């Protein structure tokens, strides 16, 4: 099938090129993000392949349908960027990659945490300038800490196992308890109890109307002083203004984020020559105890390979009129 591939980066081409011929599809790569201005690129393609910050609202879906698109193939797990009701109305099936490498994301959450806890980013810069002083590099152990994990799906579970490996105590919150987690001795608690008992809180639930601003001023009040908060899930789980306030009064001791509420206008682009108009991310970047990465938790060789394979297979199922294993909505 002919695939219009939006928001294409070099690493996408590398992984999809490896498998493209195996599935017999033809991919046209577009650097443009999908929005109401770029739907014309999809002309003469049956499939649109989109990523996390592409816009798939009603207006865009309607335009894609009128241009002859028959399938939306997301090359990501989250689908909060898609108006599923509109997709249904326009008879546009949506498929995704539900699991590619939960460990990739969980390990990145720990990369953020370990950088914050041991200040390796500062040490790296110091040593390169022959500054071997240890002043200001005092960290804290993960061993013996209480980890609060919100969402024990594929990524949350991988995170829990790593936390146990560090010798942590793990508490969890989810709408559904997971038997494997129970068998590992992980206790499920109410969200407020998890907030009040955890030294480290890591978010792994999807962004839904219920979870938007899960971490707001009230939630932060329940947390321990100096708590470490990690978000590799979706930016809007956190109400950024409340977190900035809590960083200023030291209620939050550490913040590691791979996702940001307003990331659509920033992430996946080189803006180093520009003035960033976003006041909140600019403020976050000034804190010494805040670490931000630009939505790269998924970015490992293993995960990219699996994303390409599953996406191309999803498209082949559609082409062959088979049941769509990874359809949503
Ligand atoms: P999953 O679907 O396997 O697990 C999500 C879990 O959250 C489920 O156990 C579900 O019951 C739970 N959940 C749903 N609503 C909840 C609520 N209101 N409160 C508490 N728990 C709730 O998803 P997976 O693969 O673990 O991914 C989690 C999230 O990670 C995705 O939704 C996505 O937003 C994000 N993600 C981020 C990536 C990155 O590169 N930073 C890459 C991949 C996913």
Image: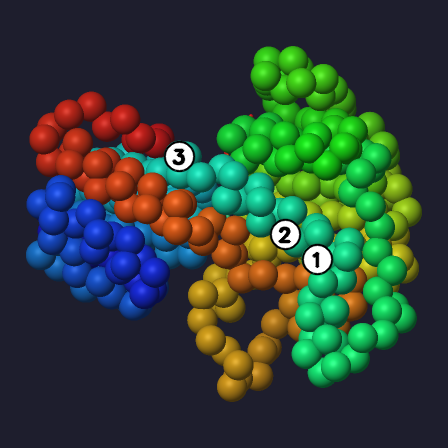
| Mark with earlier residue (3, 1) | 3
Specify whether tag 1 is near ligand 1 (CB below 8 Å): no
- Label 3 element class: loop
For the point 59% across and 16% down, which residue is it? 180
For the point 58% across and 61% down, which residue is it? 293
In this rendering, the answer to whether 29 lies above or below 130 is above
Q: Do we see residue 314 in this rendering?
A: yes
For the point 89% across and 71% down, which residue is it? 135
For the point 61% across and 72% down, which residue is it? 278
Query: Can you identify the residue that label 1 sits on?
Result: 115
* Residue 31 sits in quarter: bottom left
Distance from disc 2 to disc 1, alpha carbons, whole Å, reads 6 Å
In this rendering, the answer to whether 106 lies above or below 51 is above
Query: Can you identify the residue that label 3 sits on?
Result: 98
Question: How busy is the neighbourhood of tag 1: few (under 14 within 10 Å), some, or many (20 plus)?
Answer: some
Residue closest to the far bottom:
273
Specify whether tag 3 is near ligand 1 (CB below 8 Å): yes
Query: Can you identify the residue that label 2 sits on?
Result: 111
Marks 3 and 1 in Cβ contact (< 8 Å): no
Q: Residue 94: percent from the left, percent from the top?
A: 29, 38
Compared across the picture, whether 317 is left or right of 325 comes to: left
Front residue of this view, candidates 277 and 86: 277
Q: Do we see residue 283 in this rendering?
A: no
- Label 2 element class: helix
Distance from disc 3 to disc 2, alpha carbons, whole Å, reads 23 Å
């Amino acid at each position: 099938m002919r695939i219009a591939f939006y928001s294409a980066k070099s690493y996408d081409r590398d992984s999809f090129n490896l498998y493209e011929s195996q599935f017999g599809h033809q991919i046209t790569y577009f650097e443009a993000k999908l929005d109401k201005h770029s739907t014309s690129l999809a002309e003469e393609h049956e499939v649109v392949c989109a990523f996390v910050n592409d816009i798939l609202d009603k207006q865009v879906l309607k335009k894609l349908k009128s241009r002859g698109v028959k399938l939306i193939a997301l090359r990501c797990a989250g689908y909060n960027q898609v108006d599923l009701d509109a997709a249904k109305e326009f008879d546009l099936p949506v498929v995704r990659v539900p699991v590619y490498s939960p460990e990739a994301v969980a390990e990145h959450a720990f990369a953020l945490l370990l950088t914050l806890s041991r200040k390796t980013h500062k040490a790296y810069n110091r040593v390169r300038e022959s500054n071997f002083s240890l002043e200001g590099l005092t960290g804290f152990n993960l061993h013996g800490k209480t980890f609060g994990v919100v969402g024990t799906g594929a990524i949350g579970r991988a995170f829990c196992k790593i936390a146990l490996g560090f010798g942590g105590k793990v508490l969890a919150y989810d709408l559904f308890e997971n038997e494997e987690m129970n068998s590992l001795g992980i206790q499920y608690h109410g969200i407020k109890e998890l907030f009040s008992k955890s030294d480290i809180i890591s978010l792994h639930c999807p962004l839904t109307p219920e979870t938007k601003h899960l971490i707001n001023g009230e939630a932060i009040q329940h947390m321990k002083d100096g708590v470490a908060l990690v978000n590799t899930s979706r930016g809007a789980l956190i109400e950024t203004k409340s977190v900035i306030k809590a960083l200023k009064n030291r209620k939050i001791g550490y913040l590691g984020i791979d996702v940001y509420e307003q990331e659509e206008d920033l992430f996946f682009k080189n803006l180093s020559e520009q003035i960033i108009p976003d006041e909140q991310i600019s403020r976050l970047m000034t804190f010494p105890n805040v670490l931000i990465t630009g939505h790269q938790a998924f970015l490992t060789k293993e995960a990219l390979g699996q994303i390409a394979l599953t996406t191309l297979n999803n498209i082949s199922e559609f082409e062959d009129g088979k049941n769509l294993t990874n359809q949503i909505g």
